[in-house]
Image: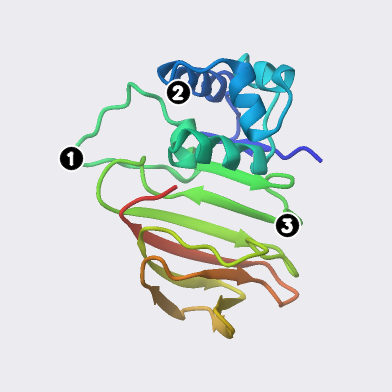
Amino acid sequence: MWYNIFCWGEQMDNNLLGKKLKEVRLERCLSIKEVAEEIKVSSSLLSQIERGLAMPSLNTLRLLAEFFDVPMFSLFMSPKEKFERVELVRKQDRIHITDGRPKVKNEKYSFELLSPDLKGDIQLCEMSLAPGENNSSRLVTHEAEEVATCVEGEITFIIDDREIVMKKGDTVRISKNTGHRWRNDSKENAKIIFAMTPPIF
């Protein structure tokens, strides 16, 4: 199954992602074949992605980010963007990564970057989960402190062997390197907004 990945609003710029992947690969003096073998995809697929002819699945995108040791969202950023004292992000201009179809109620889960970019000391994101979905099959840890607020529906916060149901308006703070994941056990969509410092996506 292929996933739709949207960047900077309604239209996806395939070339932006492809050029960024190629730029990162060449900086590390790696061939397409070497990268493809490491993340276990075909060289032809990786070549198509770099040329803007194909989109990676969300899992492939994660593998690429992990292999290159870069935040996943950074693969969608233009290298020429300038950091200003004040930056405004319109809702339609958010970076949007979705596992499923975009802008419909039955998409499985998605992430939106609410921060202007990956610069600065803090990162703000929104995660959406459809009914019965979870963000991961295993507990996830990262080198960042996280604060998350449920802003729509109900969501189950899982930490170690504990499960905590969070309702709209509930907030949790998670220390860095604490394994956790999220699951939507309700019949309605659920959303959380979370801040992380330092940024890790």
Which mark, residue 141? none
User: In the image, what residue type sits under mark 2?
Assistant: Val
According to the picture, the residue beneath numbered tag 1 turns out to be 85
User: In the image, what residue type sits under mark 3?
Assistant: Lys
Q: Is residue 198 left or right of residue 33?
A: left
Q: Position of residue 53 (x, y in %)?
A: 69, 17
Q: Is residue 25 left or right of residue 79?
A: right
Q: Residue at x 51, y 18 (%)?
A: 30
Front-most of residues 77 and 201: 201
According to the picture, the residue beneath numbered tag 3 turns out to be 105
Q: Position of residue 177 (x, y in %)?
A: 41, 66
Tag nearer the camera, 2 or 1:
2
For the residue labelled by badge 3, is the local secondary structure a helix, a strand or a loop? Answer: loop
Tag nearer the camera, 2 or 3:
2
Q: Quadrant of the N terminus?
A: top right
According to the picture, the residue beneath numbered tag 2 turns out to be 24
